[in-house]
Image (spheres, grey):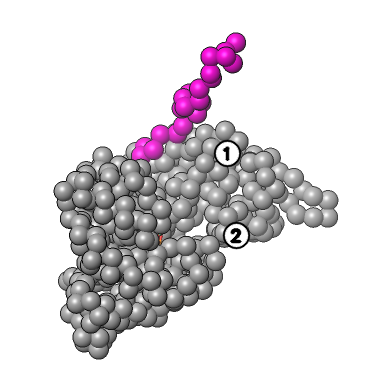
């Protein structure tokens, strides 16, 4: 069985009677006309299907909870959809927590995570009564204990650890190797546990948390991760008598960005995780734990596409041909940040044969603002609408106002209906936080 993360395009993508690409029953050319470009388009059916495939894949292990890693892409509507699908939320900032709260998420099912949470964020987390906090370092143990104490609460925590497992992904999105800024090294957990046991009486240690990296294609590392965590929990049980019941395995399942990518299905990783628990819990003399999974990219990535309008082009004499679009590194920094590779098609004439190799450039004032290097395309003309696939994760959520360009709108499509889920910024929004001190007034 295949799952949605293995599809290059949103599941509802087809070519319609106008000869245009259609997603969620909506003609992309019409969406571009109606809402303008650049435009993020999210297919509700793909999001819900992937969420259900996660739950289905872990059906054999009832003690599993799914938390959506909000940083991949979060708006109030995405929270509503995934809350309906039974997901909790992994949040990493006051802003993400506030979004979950405002959209009515069940905060008991949420977890706060991050390597440098502020006092105010911890305060907000404890006040709102979030289910779990993943504590990353010694400073945070002390701060959180203070906050919990002053609120007269005892809070459930996980310790974020670096399990020392390397995966083959881009260096910037590896997080589980030993030389990482995230979490306690396994040589530091004893000191942390001792502090919790002896001093931090307002913290209740319920488990361990790890996240190995992102865009992972190897399934065996999930097996290893479960084993490392169970082994560590068993060691802590023997040494301190503290029995932890939860393991949080983070996210990381990869998606298909190009025809060459072959990510595993969610069933394949579920199988590794469940078999590792079944084999390693008895081996390390532990009960079968509650498992938390935190997928981000694999839930939202495939569902999202970006539409751009083609503008100018430049043929370098005896060199490349550049075709520029009306967006780029500010609405999607992944190509310039991680050398991420995307696939695109011409939404208004997807059936036209490719005739040349071009480089799709962004509109921002950086030579590095290249969206796709060397892609085969029909001869592109001004006004063509390009559809970039798989931009749902870490695109809009990483967007900026570089060059004071307005952030794009995002729409949700389903059953031939399209609804705005994020308004396009206006010039008024853009200057709304600027202040001119009186002495500079004209
Ligand atoms: C980023 C992150 C995730 C989500 O990763 P994906 O690769 O998007 O699935 C999950 N857990 C933690 C702790 C993270 O930092």
Q: Nearer the viewer, residue 255 or 419?
A: 255
Compared across the picture, whether 8 is left or right of 74 comes to right
Q: Position of residue 221 (x, y in %)?
A: 40, 78
Compared across the picture, whether 45 is left or right of 33 comes to left
Compared across the picture, whether 190 is left or right of 85 comes to right
Q: Position of residue 234 (x, y in %)?
A: 25, 81
Which quarter of the figure has residue 164?
bottom left
Q: Position of residue 424 (x, y in %)?
A: 45, 34
Q: Which element type, helix, strand or loop, lies under badge 2?
A: loop
On whether residue 337 falls in the magenta region, the answer is no
Q: Residues within 10 Å of mark 2 (few under 14, many from 20)?
A: some
Q: Residue at x 38, y 71 (%)?
A: 188
Q: Nearer the viewer, residue 20 or 271?
A: 271
Lower position in the chain sequence, tag 1 or tag 2: 2
In the displayed structure, would residue 340 be above or below residue 410? below
Say whether marks 1 and 2 touch (CB < 8 Å).
no
On whether residue 441 falls in the magenta region, the answer is yes
Q: Which element type, helix, strand or loop, lies under badge 1?
A: helix
For the record, the magenta segment spans 420-442
Q: Quadrant of ligand 1?
A: bottom left
Q: Which mark is residue 402?
A: 1
Q: Residues within 10 Å of mark 1 (few under 14, many from 20)?
A: few
In the displayed structure, would residue 280 be above or below residue 253? below
Compared across the picture, whether 147 is left or right of 161 comes to left
In the displayed structure, would residue 142 be above or below residue 225? above
Q: Quadrant of the N terminus?
A: bottom left
Q: Residue at x 53, y 14 (%)?
A: 438
User: How much space separates mark 1 and mark 2, taking CA atoms?
Assistant: 19 Å
Q: Nearer the viewer, residue 84 or 322?
A: 84
Q: Which mark is residue 339?
A: 2
């Amino acid at each position: 069985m295949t799952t949605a993360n293995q599809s290059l395009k949103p599941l509802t993508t087809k070519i319609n009677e106008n000869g245009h690409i259609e997603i969620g029953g909506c003609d992309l050319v019409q969406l571009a006309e109606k809402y303008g470009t650049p435009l993020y388009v999210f297919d509700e059916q793909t999001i819900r299907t992937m969420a259900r495939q996660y739950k289905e894949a872990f059906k054999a292990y009832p003690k599993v909870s799914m938390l959506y890693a909000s940083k991949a892409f979060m708006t109030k509507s995405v929270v509503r959809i995934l809350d309906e699908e039974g997901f909790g939320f992994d949040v990493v900032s006051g802003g993400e927590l506030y979004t979950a709260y405002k959209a009515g998420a069940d905060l008991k099912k949420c977890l706060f995570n991050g390597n440098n949470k502020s006092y105010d964020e911890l305060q907000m987390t404890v006040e709102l009564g979030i289910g779990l906090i993943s504590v990353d370092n010694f400073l945070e143990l002390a701060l959180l204990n203070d906050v919990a104490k002053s609120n007269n609460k005892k809070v459930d925590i996980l310790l974020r650890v670096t399990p020392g497992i390397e995966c083959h992904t881009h260096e910037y999105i590896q997080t589980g190797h030993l030389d990482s800024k995230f979490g306690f090294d396994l040589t530091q957990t004893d000191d942390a546990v001792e502090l919790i046991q002896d001093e931090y009486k307002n913290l209740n240690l319920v488990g361990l948390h790890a996240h190995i990296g992102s865009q992972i294609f190897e399934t065996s590392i999930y097996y290893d991760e479960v084993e490392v965590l169970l082994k560590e929990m068993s060691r802590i049980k023997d040494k301190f008598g503290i029995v932890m019941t939860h393991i949080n395995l983070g996210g990381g399942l990869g998606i298909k960005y190009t025809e060459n990518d072959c990510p595993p299905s969610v069933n394949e990783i579920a199988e590794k995780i469940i078999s590792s628990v079944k084999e390693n819990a008895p081996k390390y003399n532990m009960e079968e734990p509650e498992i938390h999974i935190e997928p981000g990219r694999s839930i939202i990535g495939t569902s999202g596409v970006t539409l751009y309008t083609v503008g100018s082009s430049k043929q370098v004499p005896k060199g490349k041909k550049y075709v520029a679009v009306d967006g780029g590194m500010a609405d999607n920094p992944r190509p310039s940040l991680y050398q991420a590779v995307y696939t695109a098609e011409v939404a208004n004439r997807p059936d036209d044969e490719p005739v040349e190799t071009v480089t799709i450039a962004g509109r921002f004032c950086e030579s590095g603002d290249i969206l796709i290097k060397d892609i085969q395309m029909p001869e592109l003309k001004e006004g063509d609408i390009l559809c970039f696939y798989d931009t749902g994760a870490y695109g809009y959520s990483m967007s900026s106002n570089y060059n004071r360009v307005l952030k794009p709108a995002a729409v949700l499509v389903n059953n031939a209906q399209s609804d705005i889920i994020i308004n396009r910024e206006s010039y008024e929004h853009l200057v709304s936080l600027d202040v001119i001190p009186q002495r500079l007034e004209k």
